[in-house]
Image (tube, helix red, strand yellow):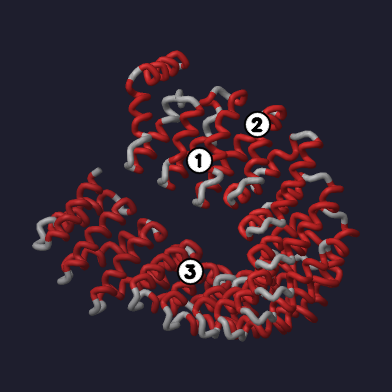
Amino acid sequence: SSQQHQEAVHHCASSRCGEDSHGKLYKNDTETQLYSLKMYSIIHIFYSSYHLWKYTIYDEDEVLLALAEQLGNFTMLVGGPEYVHCLLPPLESLATVEETVVRDKAVESLRKISQEHSPVDLEVHFEPLVKRLASGDWFTSRTSACGLFSVCYPRVSSTVKAEIRQHFRTLCSDDTPMVRRAAASKLGEFAKVLEPEYVKSDIISLFTALASDEQDSVRLLAVEACVSIATLLPQEDLETLVMPTLRQAAEDKSWRVRYMVADKFSELQKAVGSEITKNDLVPAFQNLLKDCEAEVRAAAANKVKEFCENLPEDNREQIIMTHILPCVKELVSDTNQHVKSALASVIMGLSTILGKDNTIEHLLPLFLAQLKDECPEVRLNIISNLDCVNEVIGIRQLSQSLLPAIVELAEDAKWRVRLAIIEYMPLLAGQLGVEFFDEKLNTLCMAWLIDHVYAIREAATCNLMKLVEKFGAEWAQNTIVPKVLGMANDPNYLHRMTTLFCINALSEACGQEITTKQMLPVVLKMSNDQVANVRFNVAKSLQKIGPVLDSNALQTEVKPVLEKLATDSDMDVKYFAQEAISALQS
């Protein structure tokens, strides 16, 4: 209750509870200091804001980080929004420290509590803090200031707004690259809160300057800001105010800047509209797909599907077939595996855009080449997205064109590739239908059960369960169960254990009758196996399938076998048998 809460606070303030936390702040042990900082939230920080400010002299970055984070949640603990300005001095101090993560957390807390200032308090207390940071001697304070302009600008008077814009302009041309970088990273955010006339008069000139900065780390951040700026300008201004700078960035001498253009290409495309996309962005995208740096080609390849989807519908197909597809064909045989992998993750999506005829004629040969690529990740990405193509060309065409390659991959030397094929098999089976599956893929699925890699055998077992759920218990009884039970006599004990794992997985899907009449006798017979690992897995299997069986089978067949195993010479067999007996009794 409220009364109990007040009594607890009073107790803290009037006893050694508060003194204890206060004293721990001075200890050298970092963990103790962190604990005491978090205790402030419990004892309602009855120490003055002056003391808080004084305590920011700790030299442990972890303590300073915790303090910067906690202060952002202290509004109600210092008396509410009316007194929130008391938290500004310690946060201002933390926003100037050398450690970046501490500064960032202090700025995050300042941004948070800025919303709790009234407009008057914002001008009286918060805005002067921003000015002090912006004009500080050390670059650390000036970088922190960049993150605070946008949160206070909308709520101050026009005179103060002019001062804020001036401070931001100054920081954009600061002598220190780190400050210019911080300003560039916040340029788009600041542009969003400015009046439209100042976006044109102030932001465009700053954007142009930062995009031409001598440091590529500044230029690439200007590209990111370009997306925000382009969305704020009318279409007629984009060509003259934004596009010259964007064209320059797309051909920048630094691959990192070109990479950023490629990475943000879809967002830029949406921001500038269809006309500029046709005239400017299509040639730029072609150049990025052909870039001399693999990182840039990979980033552009990753955007192929999105870029094509966002093209204007009236001439989308013509642009893709004429300008984009030739570049894509070159990337399929790129020398860099990351480029090929990035393309493989999205190329299947082109089939829904280009339609059935173009997919069969132009894309299927590319998919087939990628399925046979030497890089496992490329093959994996193609396999994982086959359903996109199936929707367009149908399973028959897909199976005729790609199924031979899929079957070949099912025996791939890389077990992860085999695993990907197994995981795709239930979807493929559902699309092919039971007859086609039995004819083409059933043998393959059974072969995986005796793979030399355990992860493959495990996945193959799970695959069988999903197939039974899809095709039904009758299909399982006629097609799968006899083959699985036949493995119980395999000379390799690992294969005999796989029989038990399959029975565990299939029992529920197959139902009581099949489990009792066909599976249970095999499990009971395996209780006499010479290998202890098989015997204790028999106990685990009986526990697993027990709920599926009727009470008569449990009492007359299962219980005697478990009691026998409970007296086995092997301690693991005894343990699992006793576990099974206890579980089935309950």
Choose between 368 and 391: the one closer to the eye: 368
Circle 1 Cα neighbour tier, 10 Å, few/some/many (<14 / 14–19 / ≥20) = many
**Disc nearer the start of the sequence (1/3):** 1
**Disc nearer the start of the sequence (1/2):** 1
Q: Which mark is residue 125?
A: 2
Q: Is residue 104 left or right of residue 30?
A: right
Q: Label 3's element?
A: helix
Which mark's residue is nearer the viewer, 1 or 3?
1
Choose between 213 and 571: the one closer to the eye: 213
Say whether marks 1 and 3 touch (CB < 8 Å).
no
List x then y, in percent, for residue 171.
Answer: 69, 52
Which mark's residue is nearer the viewer, 1 or 2?
2
The residue positioned 35% from the left and 77% from the top of the image is: 451
Distance, label 1 to label 3, CA atoms, is: 47 Å
Distance, label 2 to label 3, CA atoms, is: 60 Å
Q: Label 1's element?
A: helix
